């Protein structure tokens, strides 16, 4: 993808450049965001914080269950709270910001590749993202990583485009301002790790490529003030209202999270490389050749080595998070759009790669669906009709897409050949997610809340004993009084005066004097309380909570 290479635009002015293809892709991407319940804990957490922000009118200090919660910056909370104010609280409104920006990652990757190469390569990059089980599944969830990835990858792409314009030109300034602004929004999405990854990549690239010219083209005179305008106001305002914020956010949530296992998210060193391979699963046979060619690709003297920069970007992101004491699967999501760009030339040059990829998708869906069914049988749990239906639907969609894909390849349908694979994969991965949502143990408190809703009045006391179910609070639209549980609330409980009850005996006394109360109780805790004569009746239960009423 060097500028010296010819632009290979021929019969292949790809269908993905047409509006209706994007419309179909968007329809498939958003098809199930309202059909799945919100999962515990992350989806419930990132839906409940905006709900409390919207309900209280305090858009500066994030709160979870009424307690200060400073683990992440507020951009996604603001966007979701604004959506709630327009359309109300629901699964789709809670997921909308995250899902939209996940989809826009595909658009951004397509636009970037089209600008520096041609439409057929751009469509191939979009295809990699649309068929990635890792990217699609995370993109469907209410997590912070989709917004973080979108803004961060926009910063990277804008930076690279700026480096390919004339030095000191107006175009360079515009693209670098976009890069600085996007970096600021990435910081507001997930924190200063955005600067660490971007800065570390630029340093590593300059050393490996012996290219220091990009440092002279950062447009810091205009870009740095823009970055500060985007990021500083909230950090200043929240620290003014909450003096304890700066130490917790920067020391505990960044340095302690990276250097220690305080968050109990330790994983082996090979964890993220395996996740990345899952991220490019249908195209995994092209991964190593694509990285090798990108690293070795000839370039014009003095030109930015785009492919090498993206390889370095992937290495820095994977290496940084692999060195961290805290590892979660979505952390390396920013790698996948860059890998999609690097894989595009291999896919375009191998006309039969789509057929192989479609069989890989079908095989993965078949194995995953069979595995889910076997787990249900082993656990001696009756599979619901919806679980079986979604599982079968995912397998059928993947199989049909494979058949269409193979036919398109055989008949030489050119740029149309990848459409069945992209659309079929999007729907198939979502079918698996829908079946996963139906499995036991319970992934959500939605049905539990539905079963007891008529027992909860506006003045009913709500207790959470030995646990906290994020989705219970969200679906009830109420905060719960914590009993003998601190977890992620430890900081909020430490800095604020609350009605927290620290022990079971103290709860039992409070419960005895309650006339109208409902408690969500951890099953192990309930086993301790029941023999001691805890009054009340069980309203409902699932594998994670037993709901008891005082009335």
Image: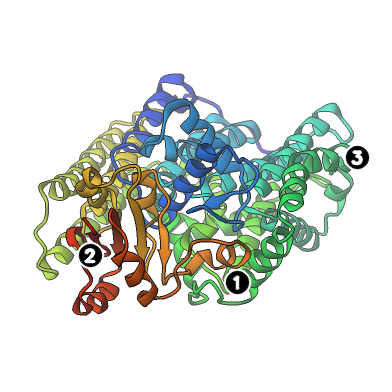
> Label 1 belongs to which residue?
324
Q: Residue 357 location, x and y as percent? A: 34, 49
Instruction: Identify the element where label 1 is drawn.
Output: loop
Instruction: Identify the element where label 2 is drawn.
Output: loop
Q: Residue 485 location, x and y as percent? A: 43, 70
What distance separates the C-alpha of mark 1 from that of mark 3? 33 Å
Residue drawn at point x = 68 percent, y = 49 percent: 187
> Label 2 belongs to which residue?
543
Looking at the rendered structure, which numbered label has been put on residue 221? 3
- Location of the C terminus by quadrant is bottom left
Instruction: Identify the element where label 3 is drawn.
Output: helix
Labels 3 and 2: the sequence-earlier one: 3
In terms of depth relative to the viewer, which is nearer, 41 or 449? 449
Residue drawn at point x = 59 percent, y = 37 percent: 113
Looking at the rendered structure, which numbered label has been put on residue 518? none
Disc 3 + disc 2, Cβ < 8 Å: no
Residue drawn at point x = 67 percent, y = 64 percent: 248
Left/right of residue 404 with respect to residue 329 in the rendered view: left
What distance separates the C-alpha of mark 3 from that of mark 2? 57 Å
Residue drawn at point x = 40 percent, y = 41 percent: 351
Disc 1 + disc 3, Cβ < 8 Å: no
């Amino acid at each position: 993808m060097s500028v010296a290479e010819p632009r290979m635009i021929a019969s292949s002015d790809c269908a993905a450049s047409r509006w209706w293809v994007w419309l179909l892709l968007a329809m498939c991407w958003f098809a199930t965001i309202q059909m799945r319940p919100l999962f515990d804990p992350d989806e419930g957490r990132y839906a409940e914080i905006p709900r409390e922000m919207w309900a209280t009118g305090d858009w500066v200090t994030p709160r979870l269950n009424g307690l200060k919660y400073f683990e992440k910056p507020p951009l996604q909370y603001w966007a979701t709270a604004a959506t709630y104010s327009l359309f109300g609280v629901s699964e789709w409104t809670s997921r909308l910001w995250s899902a939209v920006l996940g989809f826009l990652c595909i658009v951004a990757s397509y636009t970037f590749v089209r600008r520096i190469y041609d439409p057929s390569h751009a469509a191939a990059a979009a295809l990699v993202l649309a068929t990635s089980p890792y990217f699609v599944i995370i993109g469907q969830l209410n997590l912070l990583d989709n917004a973080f990835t979108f803004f961060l990858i926009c910063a990277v792409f804008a930076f690279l485009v700026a480096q390919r314009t004339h030095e000191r030109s107006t175009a360079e300034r515009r693209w670098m301002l976009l890069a600085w602004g996007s970096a600021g929004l990435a910081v507001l999405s997930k924190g200063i790790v955005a600067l660490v990854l971007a800065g570390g990549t630029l340093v590593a690239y300059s050393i490996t490529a012996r290219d220091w010219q990009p440092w002279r083209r950062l447009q810091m005179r205009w870009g740095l003030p823009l970055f500060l305008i985007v990021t500083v106001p909230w950090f200043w305002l929240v620290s003014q209202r909450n003096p304890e914020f700066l130490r917790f956010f920067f020391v505990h949530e960044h340095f302690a999270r990276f250097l220690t296992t305080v968050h109990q998210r330790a994983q082996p060193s090979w964890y993220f490389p395996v996740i990345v391979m899952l991220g490019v699963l249908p195209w995994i046979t092209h991964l190593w050749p694509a990285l090798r060619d990108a690293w070795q690709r000839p370039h014009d003297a003095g030109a930015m080595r785009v492919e090498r920069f993206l390889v370095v970007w992937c290495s820095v992101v994977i290496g940084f998070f692999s060195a961290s004491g805290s590892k979660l699967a979505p952390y390396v999501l920013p790698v996948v759009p860059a890998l999609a760009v690097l894989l595009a030339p291999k896919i375009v040059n191998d006309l039969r790669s789509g057929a192989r990829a479609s069989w890989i998708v079908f095989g993965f869906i078949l194995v995953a669906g069979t595995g889910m069914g076997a787990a249900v049988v082993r656990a001696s749990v009756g599979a619901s009709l919806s679980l079986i239906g979604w599982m079968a639907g995912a397998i059928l969609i993947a199989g049909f897409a494979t058949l269409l894909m193979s036919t398109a390849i055989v008949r030489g349908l050119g740029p149309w050949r990848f459409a069945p694979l992209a659309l079929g994969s999007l729907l198939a991965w979502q079918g698996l997610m829908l079946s996963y949502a139906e499995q036991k143990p319970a992934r959500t408190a939605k049905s539990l809340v539905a079963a007891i809703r008529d027992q909860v009045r506006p003045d009913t006391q709500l207790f959470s004993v030995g646990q906290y179910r994020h989705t219970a609070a969200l679906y009830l639209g109420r905060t719960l009084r914590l009993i003998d549980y601190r977890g992620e609330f430890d900081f909020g409980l430490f800095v604020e005066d609350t009605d927290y009850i620290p022990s079971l005996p103290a709860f039992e006394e409070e419960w005895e004097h309650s006339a109208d109360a409902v408690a969500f109780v951890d099953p192990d805790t309930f086993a301790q309380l029941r023999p001691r004569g805890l009054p009340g009746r069980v309203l409902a239960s699932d594998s994670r909570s037993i709901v008891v009423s005082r009335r």
